[in-house]
Amino acid sequence: MAVRSPVINVMAAAALKAARGLIRDFGEIEQLQVSVKGPGDFVSAADLKAERTLKAELSRARPGYGMLFEEEGAIEGSDKRHRWIVDPLDGTTNFLHGIPHFCISIALERDNEIVAAVVYEPTRDELYWAEKGAGAYLNDRRLRVSARRQLGNALIGTGMPFRDRGDKALYSAILNSVMTATSGVRRFGAAALDLAYLAAGRLDGFWEFGLQPWDIAAGILLVREAGGYVSDLSGGQTMMTSGDVLAANDHLHLPLAALIREAKRAPVDR
């Protein structure tokens, strides 16, 4: 049986407490008070309530740690080595439309390196967690990325630009290339869960542009501790600043990266 460290227990307890409120609100989706923060970017009462719960729980357990939240932004702490990176509700649009695919994502950064991660999916009661050097787990089961070796057999996750966001022509060219070379592409609408699914072997690869640190911090560690590879789209390690991420198992990372690079170089009609 997997043994969780004190810091993972802290993160898991905070996620479970915040999730109780999300599940209650999800059951009453029509009564949610929803405000519009920007085109296609919704902030629900449930989202804000979950963020307050997570902030309170993590602050009580580790006073002094800095924090980075999706809504409240960066909060400086007296401990300059440690920082929580938190998305209280990844998959907000799914949540607001009654689609049961969303999660809470918490990562702990130490000296600018992600060292602990929790992604909790409340509707399935699936707790993904990892610590640097200690492996990745789904509840108590050790995770490994898939062993597929051929792109033609691979199922790839992605996120799509919407409204006026992103370069749709470039994305369409890449999507067409990946669709042609693989057994399928899925867009689930929650990047943290996409990366958790990759760690669990449910997806074989994942790419997306323009994500935020709270979307990917926990997922990056989950994939790495499950034996996968994560980089930016150029093969570097700028994911947390560029927001561009490419992840896959060890057999498919390089061919998927090459496929995407080739599609980016090809002329695009705009």
Image: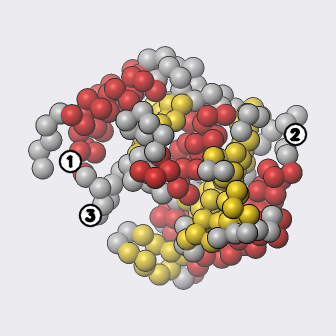
Total label count?
Answer: 3
**Residue named by callout 3:** 164
Q: CA distance from mark 1 to mark 3?
A: 12 Å
The reply to whether the C-beta atoms of the residues labelled 2 and 3 are less than 8 Å apart is no
Residue topped by disc 1 = 169
- In terms of sequence position, does the residue under pointer 2 or pointer 3 come before the other? 2
Amino acid marked by disc 2 = Val
Q: Which numbered disc covers residue 84?
A: none
Residue at x-position 80% and y-position 68%:
63
The relative height of residue 80 versus residue 177 in the rendered view (above or below) is below
Callout 1, which amino acid? Ala
* Residue 153 coordinates in the image, percent (x, y): 44, 21
Q: Are marks 1 and 3 in contact (CB under 8 Å)?
A: no
Give left or right: position of 95 versus 27. left
Name the residue type under label 3.
Answer: Asp
**Can the viewer see residue 123?**
no
Residue at the disc numbered 2: 3
Q: Give the class, few, some or many, for how many residues have Cα within 10 Å of label 3's Cα (few <14, many ≥20).
A: few
CA gap between label 2 and label 3 equals 46 Å
